[in-house]
Amino acid sequence: MKKINLNTLDQLILLSLDDDKGTFVHEYSVFGYCLAGAALYDLTLKERINISEGRINVIHQEETGDEALDECLKLISKSKKARKINYWIDKLGYKESDLKGSTLKKLLDLQILEKREDKILWLFTYNKYPTKNEVPEVLIRKRLNAIIHGEQQPMSNDIMIISLVNSCGLNKEVYGKEVAKEKKKTIQKLIKEFKFANETSQVIKEIHDLIIASLALVVIIPTMTASSS
């Protein structure tokens, strides 16, 4: 069986879908920002952007071949100046529907998901995306669960996924309600104290920390505004 390589954005979308219903488990306002963070991380790994002094710079405009990432790259490239990470997390976060759509299309093409139409009140049609091939998601869940139980050493990419899952409130969905509660402090400790092994990993750690910090900043402001209104 050919191995399917999924990027951070793909994995986050998969983990956020109910396998049977084919709908997103949570429709929180923060989810779009988490998708934006995943996309920025993937673009960094693909050496299309870098982050210097908290600002994002495009270093290569060549397309990655991934529709969702290329749309983000195109948008960033159009900017007349290097902007801060939280600006792009906010900007790309508003593209949640596009990020979802492009990634769902990719997962359909890979035959990991299938598309079904359903109706609300026999009037309004909407699409559902139940799992067709469960293997990729099962492997992701097994890996993450093994990491938080101390049974497997995490890689830097794993820490990014764990951080994003934590940031967008998907711990219960990914690990189960009891485990999420039991391992809450372990997850936070993993995110905070993970030792990045070499110089390359240190760069990834810096990117990870900046994205997660910016996510927190972007998420807190609308939450405070909503609670005060």
Image (tube, helix red, strand yellow):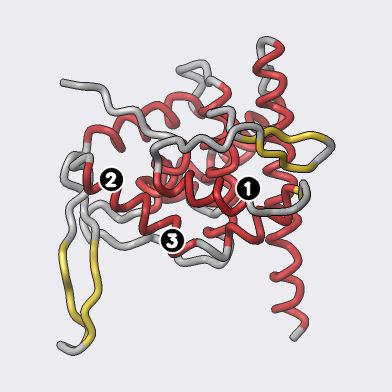
Q: Secondary structure at mark 2?
A: helix
Which amino acid, by three-letter code, is at mark 1? Ser
How dense is the environment of label 3, judged by Cα within 10 Å: few (below 14), some, or many (20 and up)? some
Which amino acid, by three-letter code, is at mark 3? Asp
Q: Residue at x 36, y 59 (%)?
A: 101
Looking at the picture, tell me which residue is in the foreground, 81 or 182. 81
Which amino acid, by three-letter code, is at mark 2? Leu
Q: Answer with the quarter of the image where residue 143 lies.
A: top left
Q: Secondary structure at mark 3?
A: helix
Q: Earlier in the sequence, mark 1 or mark 3?
A: 1
Q: Residue at x 71, y 39 (%)?
A: 57
Q: Position of residue 163 (x, y in %)?
A: 59, 40
Residue 107 in view, yes or no: yes
Marks 1 & 2, CB-CB < 8 Å contact? no
Tag of residue 98: 3
Residue 99 sits above or below residue 154 on the image? below
Residue 111 sits above or below residue 122 on the image? above
Q: Earlier in the sequence, mark 1 or mark 2?
A: 1
Q: Nearer the viewer, mark 1 or mark 3?
A: 1
Tag of residue 77: 1
Q: Nearer the viewer, mark 2 or mark 3?
A: 3
Q: Secondary structure at mark 1?
A: helix
Q: Earlier in the sequence, mark 2 or mark 3?
A: 3
